[in-house]
Image (cartoon, helix red, strand yellow):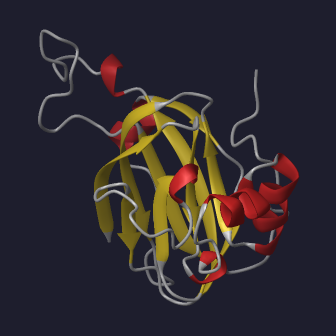
Amino acid sequence: MEFSETVTTGAGMFALWSPAAFRGVVDYATWTGELLEDEDITRHIRSGTIVPINIHSDGRFQFLVRLGFDFRLAGLTARERQFLVAVSDPYLFVATDGAILSGIEHAGAIPGTPAGTRFHLPVPPGRWQVTVTIVDWTAESGMCDARGDPLPGALPDFTILVNPEKHPVPYRTRVETFDRR
């Protein structure tokens, strides 16, 4: 199952997060108590309630989330592999009430959150392994218009693979999603 959406951040980081884990985040004060510092985010990563997509850049990016199941795991297509830039180690995500992908500044149940800032995903309850990839869609010939914007059919900026946990593995617990080379 695939879901595609453009998501925006002004904080340099996106996050796939558990709505149940952040119901108590209702304003800026409660948000800063939960997510302001790296050690706060790391605590949530370790508990499986947030997966950071930390790119140190603000902007609008196209995301494709591919949800796998026991009978068919999510993987990259040959086309995505051809233009692959980076792959994270797997993160643990524990779903109880689906998942939301947004800029990290929009995590929580904050009233008045602008429409279109959150991408709701029907992730069934359970333990999931999440891998984040960066795809260079601009490197694919014929996928940009004259202004450099993507044409219909262009690959996303990010493909996120969400697969059921078959066996626990050493999960990534760092706020930095990708290792620097």
Residue 90 drawn at (x, y percent): 69, 58
Furthest-top residue in this view = 146
> Left or right of 131: which side holds 151?
left
Q: Quadrant of the N terminus?
A: bottom left
Q: How many tags in the picture?
A: 0
Residue 43, compared with residue 177, is above or below; it is below
Task: Give the quarter of the image for residue 125.
Answer: bottom right
Res 91 visible: no
Q: Quadrant of the C terminus?
A: top right
Q: Residue at x 22, y 34 (%)?
A: 154
Res 137 visible: yes
Residue 156, compared with residue 147, is above or below; it is below
Residue 76 drawn at (x, y percent): 44, 50
Q: Residue at x 58, y 75 (%)?
A: 18
> Left or right of 164: which side holds 139?
left
Task: Give the quarter of the image for residue 51.
Answer: bottom right
Residue 48, compared with residue 115, is above or below; it is below
Residue 5 drawn at (x, y percent): 29, 53
The foreground one among 61 and 140 is: 61
Q: Residue at x 17, y 11 (%)?
A: 147
Residue 82 drawn at (x, y percent): 41, 31
Q: Residue at x 73, y 56 (%)?
A: 32
Residue 109, compared with residue 150, is above or below; it is below
The foreground one among 143 and 120 is: 120
